[in-house]
Image (spheres, rainbow, N blue to C red):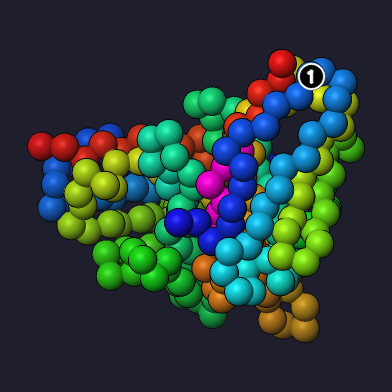
Amino acid sequence: QVQLQESGPGLVKPSQTLSLTCSVSGGSISSAGHYWSWIRQHPGKGLEWIGYISYILYSGSTYYNPSLQSRVTISLDTSRHQFSLRLSSVTAADTAVYYCARELGLCSGGSCYRQYFFDQWGQGTLVTVSS
Amino acid sequence: QSALTQPASVSGSPGQSITISCTGTSSGVVDYNYISWYQQHPGKAPTLIIYEVSNRPSGVPDRFSGSKSGNTASLTISGLQAEDEADYYCSSHTSSNVVFGGGTRLTVL
């Protein structure tokens, strides 16, 4: 059973960069057809998908939510079994609980396809943006 | 405004059945068979309860079922239990983006 665990600062100052790491255990982070995602939830609100990274051809392939694309970077460290989120130029509107999650793809004939559901989630970490 | 619209709240008594709807507000959002549903208890991470419209992951009781008709997906919970009280989110995608509904608070009376 794959387990995910977020870590990082709980407080970030406005205009700075939010950095979080998700540690993956119980499975390989470089498996084909796995899309490692970040999702956030503003206090008392719904869920917002941030983006994913997938290990393809010895490197990471990413896709970001267009609404956040200009500020988001997701990276992969296979040696540490971790993937990370960087969100730049944060404001109070970025205060949220941040979750890492695994999206399972379907692989066939050497190609993998997303299935757009998240079967494993981390417990979440609250990040507050405040001076 | 979310691309998926859910009722803000629903309620039911133990043993009853309830249905939560999820309607696509953008063209193509609910066209594909990639509807999923998540349950979230207060202070906890969401957990997957339905994927690909009507499939249940291992361990999810068969009291939970999903369906889709046209542009609307539905989650039905039969035989309501106290532990079903939670927030429920539907999810789909537009192009490569994952989108979520605004969430529905289920109260078990």
The quarter in which the C terminus of chain A is drawn is top left
Query: Residue A68: percent from the left, percent from the top?
Result: 34, 64
Image quadrant where residue A13 sits: top left
Chain for numbered disc 1: B
Which residue is pictured at 89% across the width and 37% down the height? B62
Judge left or right: residue A18 versus residue B68: left
Residue A85 in view in this figure: yes
Which residue is pictured at 38% across the width and 41% down the height? A42
Image quadrant where residue B95 sits: bottom right
Tag 1, which secondary structure? Answer: loop
Q: Is residue A73 above or below residue B63?
A: below
- Residue in front for this viewpoint, B5 or A104: B5
Tell how many labels: 1
- Residue in front for this viewpoint, A27 or A98: A98
Which residue is pictured at 63% across the width and 62% down the height? B24
Judge left or right: residue A99 versus residue B80: left
Q: Residues within 10 Å of mark 1 (few under 14, many from 20)?
A: some
Residue A119 in view in this figure: no
Q: Which residue lies most toward the left here? A: A131
Which residue is pictured at 22% across the width and 36% down the height? A11
- What amino acid is at disc 1? Ser
Magenta-span inclusion, residue B103: yes
- Residue in front for this viewpoint, A99 or B13: B13
Judge left or right: residue A67 versus residue B65: left
Q: Which residues are magenta?
A: B99-104
Q: Is residue B85 above or below residue A20?
A: above
Query: Residue A117: percent from the left, percent from the top?
Result: 65, 57
Magenta-span inclusion, residue A28: no
- Residue occupied by mark 1: B13
